[in-house]
Image (cartoon, helix red, strand yellow):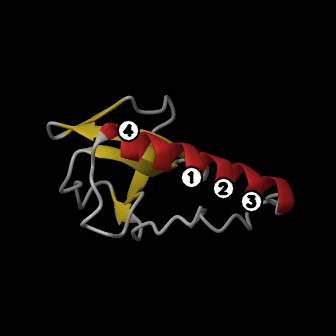
Amino acid sequence: MEIDTTGWFPLDDYAPAREGWYEVRLTTGDTAFSRFIDGHWTEQPVVPFTHWRGLSADPGDSADSEHMDAQAAAAQGVRAVWNAFFPVVGDTHPLKK
């Protein structure tokens, strides 16, 4: 399954325009998922995050929870495979900037 995500947005500068699940960049450099509902982040990771990105770059995609849950699960699977085949070495992680 191909995942066409949006770019990363700084948490302090932008809030999502739609409700739903988003991939978030943790302060550790790892990623996780959080839900944005009624102008607030819910179901968020314990570790603070600094950036977020949408799971679909297509604004026409439905933001219903079943659709986004499937995309979040797929994104987690892709990230796990990526990490298994391309382990992080020191500070060379592409998300650590």
Q: Quadrant of residue 14?
A: bottom left
Residue 40, x across and y down, in percent: 21, 37
When the figure is inspected, residue 4 is found, relative to residue 45, above or below; the finding is: below
Q: Amino acid at mark 4?
A: Glu
Residue positioned 52% across, 64% down in the render? 3
- The kind of secondary structure element at disc 4 is helix
The residues tagged by marks 3 and 4 sit, at their Cα atoms, a distance apart of 24 Å
Lower sequence index among marks 1 and 3: 1
Asked whether 23 or 51 is in front, the reply is 23
Asked whether 79 or 13 is in front, the reply is 79
Task: Give the residue at mark 4.
Answer: 66
The residues tagged by marks 1 and 2 sit, at their Cα atoms, a distance apart of 5 Å
Q: Which numbered dot is residue 88?
A: none
When the figure is inspected, residue 93 is found, relative to residue 22, above or below; the finding is: below
Q: Are marks 3 and 2 in contact (CB under 8 Å)?
A: yes
Q: Which numbered dot is residue 78?
A: 2
- The kind of secondary structure element at disc 3 is helix
Q: Which numbered dot is residue 82?
A: 3
Task: Give the residue at mark 1.
Answer: 75
